[in-house]
Image (tube, rainbow, N blue to C red):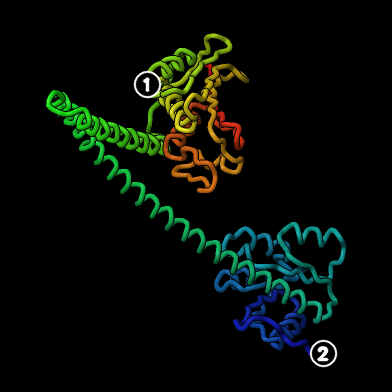
């Protein structure tokens, strides 16, 4: 019988043929060699295991009925070895009962050929599983390459984050000194300067404070991300803290109308009070940025699903649904064509802070209908 021409890849695949009958071993090995494969005969299960361990083949043709160690036991031993387990095993046996085939597949065989066999069938199945194995190896190689690239990227990101953190941390001290000396200058020379000149100092002071605030938020976000920011949890009145945050705004609220509504009148939360106050301040400040003069900002405090809930509703332009998750991301930016909302670190800090307490944060918004930022905290 003339074997069909081979369509295997240029690298010669190695096939281990395991059969205790010399005639079968010689026949299969000769035909496989004629098709361009490297056929390696093994007359027993023990010899097959040693040959596979010394030089793993690309595929194994395995007889079942063999003395001392049958094909099932050989396959079981192969699959128990992590280095040999991926090698495809095709059983070739005179056993043709369904249970024999089921057992072969359950032990890790990829195919089953019944004796007496036609070599065309064996060849077709060998080629199929060799190609599948080749694709599997290529997939493993690419996955390994992707993992290495990912690990390298993580290293670079960590290096970048550490460098940024170091620079930001080092900026904090000189900016603090600048703010202090600026206040001192204003105190010393306020009577000697014209109102316009004092206004210049006020502008510099305002921007210095803003930079300090940004640096503090960036450092806190970094600490939150690495679980290095301790939370001092206590029970407090979330309604009272909200009203205090609104009162503290003073003239910063401009002509916007802020109202606080609570149901019930006192809502208790169990969280870090200082961190929660910053979250409330960030959300109200965010609302002020996008609410027009004379616009209304409504802050509601309530309970929902055994959690304390606070919501800040503004009268701004609204945010498209596709950007609702993105605005909480670190340095996230919405489409420049869309109405711009604050997408800096303030909202990122809010998300990390709320989730660190076991709460949730979200947004409800639509174009032309304003936005509602809300969060929940444990009641205690």
Disc 1 + disc 2, Cβ < 8 Å? no
Helix, strand or loop at label 1? It is helix
Instruction: Tell me which residue sits at (59%, 17%) in the image.
Output: 303
Instruction: Return the residue found at the far top.
Output: 265
Whether residue 83 is situated above or below residue 267 in the rendered picture: below
Q: CA distance from mark 1 to mark 2?
A: 98 Å
Whether residue 65 is situated above or below residue 159 in the rendered picture: below
Callout 2 environment at 10 Å: few (<14), some (14 to 19), or many (20+)? few
Helix, strand or loop at label 2? It is loop
Residue placed most toward the observer, 22 or 222? 222
Residue identifier under label 2:
1
Instruction: Return the residue found at the far right.
Output: 97
Callout 1 environment at 10 Å: few (<14), some (14 to 19), or many (20+)? few
Residue placed most toward the observer, 303 or 312? 312
Horizontal placement of 244 versus 5: left or right? Answer: left
Looking at the rendered structure, the number of numbered marks drawn on it comes to 2
Horizontal placement of 27 versus 160: left or right? Answer: right
Residue 46, image x and y in percent?
64, 69
Residue placed most toward the observer, 11 or 307? 307
Looking at the rendering, which quadrant does residue 82 occupy? bottom right
Instruction: Tell me which residue sits at (45%, 42%) in the image.
Output: 330
Name the disc covering residue 8, or none. none
Name the disc covering residue 251, or none. 1
Residue 340, image x and y in percent?
50, 41
Instruction: Tell me which residue sits at (22%, 36%) in the image.
Output: 173
Residue placed most toward the observer, 72 or 83? 83
Residue 310, image x and y in percent?
53, 21
Q: Earlier in the sequence, mark 1 or mark 2?
A: 2
Instruction: Tell which tag, 1 or 2, sits nearer the viewer.
Output: 1
């Amino acid at each position: 019988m003339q074997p069909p021409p081979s369509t295997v890849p240029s690298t010669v695949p190695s096939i281990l043929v395991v059969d205790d009958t010399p005639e079968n071993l010689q026949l299969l090995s000769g035909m496989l060699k004629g098709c361009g494969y490297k056929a390696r005969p093994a007359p027993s299960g023990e010899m097959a295991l040693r040959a596979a361990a010394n030089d793993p083949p690309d595929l194994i043709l395995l007889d079942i009925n063999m003395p001392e160690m049958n094909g099932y036991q050989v396959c079981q031993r192969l699959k128990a070895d992590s280095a040999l387990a991926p090698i495809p095993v095709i059983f070739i046996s005179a056993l043709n009962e369904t249970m024999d085939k089921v057992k072969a597949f359950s032990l890790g065989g990829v195919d089953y050929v019944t004796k007496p066999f036609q070599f065309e069938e064996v060849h077709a199945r060998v080629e199929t599983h060799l190609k599948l194995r080749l694709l599997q190896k290529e997939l493993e190689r690419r996955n390994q390459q992707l993992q290495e690239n990912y690990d390298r990227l993580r290293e670079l990101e960590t290096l970048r984050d550490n460098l940024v953190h170091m620079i930001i941390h080092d900026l904090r001290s000189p900016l603090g000194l600048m703010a202090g000396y600026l206040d001192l200058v204003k105190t010393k020379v306020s009577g000697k300067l014209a109102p316009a000149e004092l206004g210049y100092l006020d502008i510099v002071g305002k921007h210095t404070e803003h930079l300090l605030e940004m640096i503090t938020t960036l450092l806190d976000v970094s600490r939150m991300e690495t679980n290095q920011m301790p939370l001092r949890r206590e029970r407090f009145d979330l309604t009272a803290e909200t009203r205090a945050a609104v009162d503290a705004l003073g003239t910063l609220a401009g002509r916007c109308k802020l109202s606080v509504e609570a149901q019930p009148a006192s809502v208790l939360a169990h969280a870090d009070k200082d961190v929660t106050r910053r979250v409330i301040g960030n959300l109200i400040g965010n609302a002020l940025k996008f609410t027009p003069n004379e616009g209304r900002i409504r802050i509601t405090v309530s309970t929902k699903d055994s959690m304390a809930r606070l919501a800040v509703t503004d009268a701004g332009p609204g945010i498209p649904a596709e950007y609702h998750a993105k605005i909480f991301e670190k340095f996230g930016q919405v489409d420049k064509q869309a109405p711009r909302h604050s997408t800096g670190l303030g909202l990122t800090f809010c998300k990390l802070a709320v989730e660190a307490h076991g709460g949730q944060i979200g947004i409800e918004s639509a174009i032309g209908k304003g936005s509602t930022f809300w969060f929940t905290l444990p009641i205690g």
